[in-house]
Amino acid sequence: MNDILLPFTNLPDAYIVLDTETTGLLDEIGPPGIVTLGLTPVDNHKILNSIEFKLKPYRSINDEAQRVHGISNTEASTFDDISIKWPEIKGYLNNNYVVIHNASFDWPIIEFHIQKFDLDPLSNVSIFCSQKSAIPFAKENNIPMSSRGPSLDALTEYLNTSSLRVNGIHGAAIDTKQTALVVEALRKLGENK
């Protein structure tokens, strides 16, 4: 089992977990807007305090997305434009190793927003997808998964890590902390084999 967890045991001692809650999914109009962006630093296996940025999306939030994260269009209209929060977000991400549970969804949205709003580009950022990296572990342990890999919920349940969600509502900061718990549990499991 150690080999299938190598991506997790090889993680650097310090990294930051990122997640977004959005206006929906990619559709014929284009990428969704970011409603919240969460970051949770991990330093030497210690999960630090999460931070969440509330961002005014450039598109309306669809009904399904509102059910997922519980944020209405009225509430989101009071959030700051991404350009105001970007210098702080960039400070967390630059020169860092970024862990994202579904990087194929979240990271292109970040890149799209950088381009669309002419934000300062990021430098020296490495991306690690914990979802894709957990596929061999999920297969070996018969954990249900989609073509993208095991969900955060499925890994949380299998690893018996505490779920931080309240009433099933997703939140960017909550999901980054949950991802950090899962990633560190997989790292520990790999190191103990």
Image (tube, grey):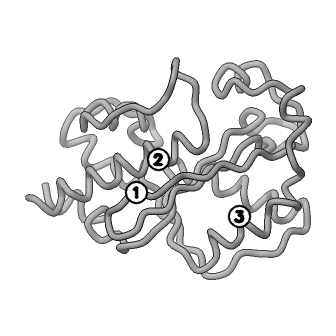
Which amino acid, by three-letter code, is at mark 2?
Lys
Quarter containing the N terminus: bottom left
Chain-order first, disc 2 or disc 1: 1
Residue that carries the numbered disc 2 in the rendered image: 177
| Disc 3, SS | helix
| Disc 1, SS | strand
| Disc 2, SS | helix
Local crowd size for mark 2, using a 10 Å CA cut-off: few (<14), some (14–19), many (≥20): many
Nearest the eye: 6 or 13: 13
Label 1, label 3: how many angstroms apart (C-alpha)? 18 Å
Give the left or right position of residue 61, taking residue 77 as reference. Answer: left
Residue 47, label in figure: 1
Instruction: Check if mark 2's residue and mark 1's residue have beta carbons within 8 Å.
Output: yes
Question: Residue visible at 88% across and 31% down?
Answer: 60
Residue 3 % position (x, y): 18, 62
Quarter containing the C terminus: bottom left
Local crowd size for mark 1, using a 10 Å CA cut-off: few (<14), some (14–19), many (≥20): some
Chain-order first, disc 3 or disc 2: 3
Residue reaching furthest to the left: 193
Chain-order first, disc 1 or disc 3: 1
Give the left or right position of residue 74, taking residue 32 as reference. Answer: right
Q: Is residue 27 above or below residue 130?
A: above
Nearest the eye: 31 or 153: 153
Instruction: Check if mark 1's residue and mark 3's residue have beta carbons within 8 Å.
Output: no
Q: Is residue 158 above or below residue 104?
A: above
Residue that carries the numbered disc 3 in the rendered image: 89
Q: Nearer the viewer, mark 1 or mark 3?
A: 1
